[in-house]
Image (cartoon, rainbow, N blue to C red):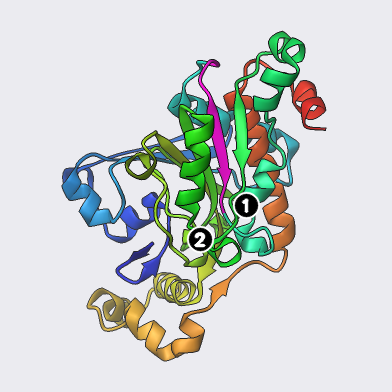
């Protein structure tokens, strides 16, 4: 998503950057639980959708910060994310859900989807082949699909997902993908959930046809974690932060009056530099941990009252 040049897929960041208010057609609420920030932005009408460049719907971000360094924060984050997913999906275990892990498993920054699916409890096969096991646990019929990317399959992701969905007939699809953020502190430390679908590949700037109720005929929930930042966006934000911290009125006026913009930063960086995408040096570790957190949250949200030990045993 490119919002007047600034590249981000997070609705909350776009709203902040464009200085949009509730009067522009938004609901915006921020809360905190166990030190974890939760923000819910709802795009209420078509006009608001056009202003922010995203479909109408609800966008929930959870900033889980230090979850990878503190087991207590990790547990709180999974419970909060699971609760938000459960709120969107519902608790009726009779409904069939299909998970779609979007992205390229060979590209670390784009592997959130496939890596997450490796840790979820899939049960569609158990229901038919091991009904005695399935019936004794509070499980939902759950299938998982990693459709790959257009460059390796030659087939649009939406066409693969639609074909499988027509065969398995899920009530709901949950698509997991990598996203882009404009803030370094949000990389692999934020989850965005939305009930309005997703365009695959948005995190690495490779937008494909959207997965949504309009294209698939059933509701599509998207879950994403930012893994990258656009170089020009990072540079522009760093300059804004420097202006703020230096208390330089002259520099602030240059930004305020539009003399220094995202476009001028791109020009200064040059075409090759401005098109670069930045990831942390330990992106492989961060993606692995973020995928584990998402998988655990999905298991808690989609199945019934399973203990952490039961979840781990069913995965292994």
Residue 48 place in picture, x, y as percent: 21, 48
Q: Is residue 172 above or below residue 140?
A: below
Q: Residues within 10 Å of mark 2 (few under 14, many from 20)?
A: many
Provide the secondary structure element on which disc 1 rests.
helix
Left/right of residue 133 with respect to residue 94 in the rendered view:
right
Of the 4 image quadrants, the one containing the C terminus is top right
Q: Is residue 236 above or below residue 65?
A: below
Is residue 62 visible to the viewer in this orientation of the structure? no
Residue 306 place in picture, x, y as percent: 70, 18
Q: Residue at x 48, y 55 (%)?
A: 200
Q: Residue at x 35, y 77 (%)?
A: 262
Q: Residue at x 61, y 28 (%)?
A: 142
| Residue range (magenta) | 93-102
Provide the secondary structure element on which disc 2 rests.
helix
- From the viewer's side, name the closer residue of 22 and 271: 271
Residue 298 appears in which quarter of the rendering? top right
Left/right of residue 250 with respect to residue 285 in the rendered view:
left
Q: Is residue 96 magenta?
A: yes
Q: Are marks 2 and 1 in contact (CB under 8 Å)?
A: yes
Q: Residues within 10 Å of mark 1 (few under 14, many from 20)?
A: many
Q: Which residue is mark 1?
A: 112
Q: Which mark is residue 57?
A: none
First along the sequence among labels 2 and 1 = 1
Disc 2 to disc 1, how far (Cα)?
A: 10 Å
């Amino acid at each position: 998503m490119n919002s007047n040049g600034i590249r981000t897929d997070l609705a909350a960041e776009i709203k902040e950057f464009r200085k949009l208010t509730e009067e522009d057609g938004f609901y915006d609420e921020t809360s905190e639980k166990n030190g974890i920030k939760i923000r819910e932005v709802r795009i209420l009408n078509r006009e608001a959708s056009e202003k922010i460049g995203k479909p109408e719907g609800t966008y929930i971000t959870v900033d889980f910060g230090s979850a990878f360094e503190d087991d207590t924060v990790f547990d709180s984050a999974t419970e909060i994310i699971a609760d938000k997913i459960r709120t969107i999906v519902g608790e009726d275990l009779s409904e069939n859900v299909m998970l779609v892990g979007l992205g390229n498993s060979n590209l670390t920054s784009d592997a959130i989807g496939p890596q997450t699916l490796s840790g979820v409890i899939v049960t569609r096969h158990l229901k038919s082949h091991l009904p005695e096991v399935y019936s004794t646990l509070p499980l939902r019929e759950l299938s998982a699909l990693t459709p790959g990317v257009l460059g390796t399959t030659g087939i649009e992701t939406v066409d693969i997902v639609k074909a499988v969905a027509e065969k398995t007939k899920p009530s709901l699809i949950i698509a997991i993908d990598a996203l882009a953020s404009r803030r370094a502190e949000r990389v692999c430390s934020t989850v965005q959930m939305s009930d309005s679908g997703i365009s695959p590949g948005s995190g690495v700037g490779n937008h494909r046809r959207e997965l949504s109720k309009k294209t698939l005929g059933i509701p599509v929930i998207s879950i994403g974690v930012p893994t990258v930042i656009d170089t020009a966006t990072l540079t522009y934000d760093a300059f804004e932060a420097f202006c703020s911290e230096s208390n330089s009125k002259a520099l602030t006026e240059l930004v305020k009056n539009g003399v220094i913009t995202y476009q001028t930063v791109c020009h200064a960086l040059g075409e090759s530099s401005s098109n670069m995408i930045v990831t942390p040096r330990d992106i492989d570790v961060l993606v692995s941990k973020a995928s584990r957190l998402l998988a655990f949250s999905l298991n808690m949200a989609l199945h019934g009252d399973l203990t952490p030990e039961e979840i781990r045993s069913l995965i292994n």
